[in-house]
Image (cartoon, rainbow, N blue to C red):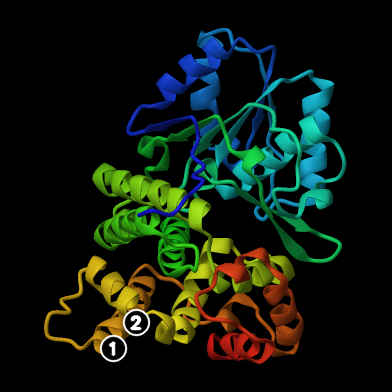
Amino acid sequence: MLEKRRIYLPPLSLVGPGVIVDLVEEIKDQDGKKVLVVTDKVLNELGVVGKITDLMDQKSINYVVFDEVKPNPTCANVNAGLKVFKENNCDFILTIGGGSPQDCGKAIGILATNGGDIKDYEGIHISKKKATTIAAINTTAGTASEVTINYVITDEERKVKMVMVDKNCLVSIAVNDPELMLNKPAALTAATGMDALTHAVEAYVSVGAFHWSDHMSLYAIQLIGESLRDAVNEGSNLEARSKMAWAQFIAGQAFSNCGLGFVHSAAHQLGGLYNTPHGVANAVLLPHVERFNLSSCPEKFAKIAQAMGVDISAMSEQEAAESALDAISQLSKDVGIPSGIKALGAKEEDFVLMAENALADVCTGGNPKSVCLEDAIEIYKSSM
């Protein structure tokens, strides 16, 4: 309890049904010239974006919509969004969506104030100036990009996901309104929910974990264990959606301040090479990487099992730790996640390249157990 910690959190977070109304009031109070709305075409066509822009129209807030963000946003997406930002003299960014619009909006905000190319900012705290003011509306319970100091952009030339950890990208207003998450497709709900679980588990066992992040992580794991199946199976279940919104929000705060691990490093390679959805990649790899990590902190895995509802009272510590992996795998199976990376298009001939790139990923440093090239290749093989 005597250690010093630097904790990054958004200045304002709005969580709960109907909070988008409060957000629009906050944007109005900013008294900016023009808002760049960063989103994707699907959310725009489904009318999700319209729900927010209608409220903005009522308050006479000027805005322009950029809806060209792709899943696993690229450098080209960022540059296109920045062009719209500049051409329309915007001074505020509103992101609407899951991790892709959030990450793209952060990247645009960093370039708007720092200049250069987004590739210049790969790494940890590279930028010098705070991003343009950003409000982030999250529409999926998964990535938590709206509350973290992380963003990920795909370098389409190298086919590598660049991880940026940057205090200057932290949004000013984070929004989680579970009403916007209702009736999302089951597969999307499952993938993003397992992404949130991965955040919580990796944060809990990370070398950077501490008492505050431990409590946050375990509570997020508990909420996900209680609600993800219902959120997947009952798309209009507001209680389940609300629990998942809180879970991913809490897990995001935890990992943003203590780090992740090799699950994310390995998953980033699937996204970079095969354009695999990030949450699905995490979900498939999670039990395999954590089996590798099990010996490093079995007591923590025992607590993960307990948080997921496993009765460990009659188990040894090792048995309880292993039951955590069983509980994770069962949840993944129950919500329809593929059983291996082969189903995601992974090819064994790519494993060496993937392993090399994963070891260079910024998230690897947080893994509780050191990973060498042979270990990384074996993890990919075991995940097939």
**Rendered location of residue 120, percent (x, y):** 83, 50
Residue toward you, 68 or 155: 155
Task: Reply above or below: 100 against 200.
Answer: above
10 Å crowding of disc 1: few (<14), some (14-19), many (20+): some
Residue 127 makes an appearance in the image: yes
| Amino acid type at image mark 2 | Pro
Tag 1: amino acid:
Gln
**Side of 364 where 292 appears, left or right:** left
Q: Which of 165/233 is in front?
A: 165
Q: Report whether 354 appears left or right of 326.
A: right
304 with respect to 22 (left or right): left
Residue at 50% x, 52% y is 257
As helix, strand or loop, the secondary structure at mark 2 comes to helix
SS under mark 1: helix
Q: Which mark is residue 298?
A: 2
Q: Between residues 224 and 187, which one lies in front from this camera angle?
A: 224
Question: Residue 366 at x, y = what percent?
Answer: 55, 68
Residue, disc 1: 318
At 50% from the left and 80% from the top, the residue drawn is 289
Rendered view: 384 above or below 1: below
Looking at the figure, which quarter contains the N terminus? bottom left
Residue 107 percent across, percent down from the top left = 72, 42
Could you say where residue 271 lies in the image, as x and y percent from the top left? 66, 66
At 76% from the left and 65% from the top, the residue drawn is 160
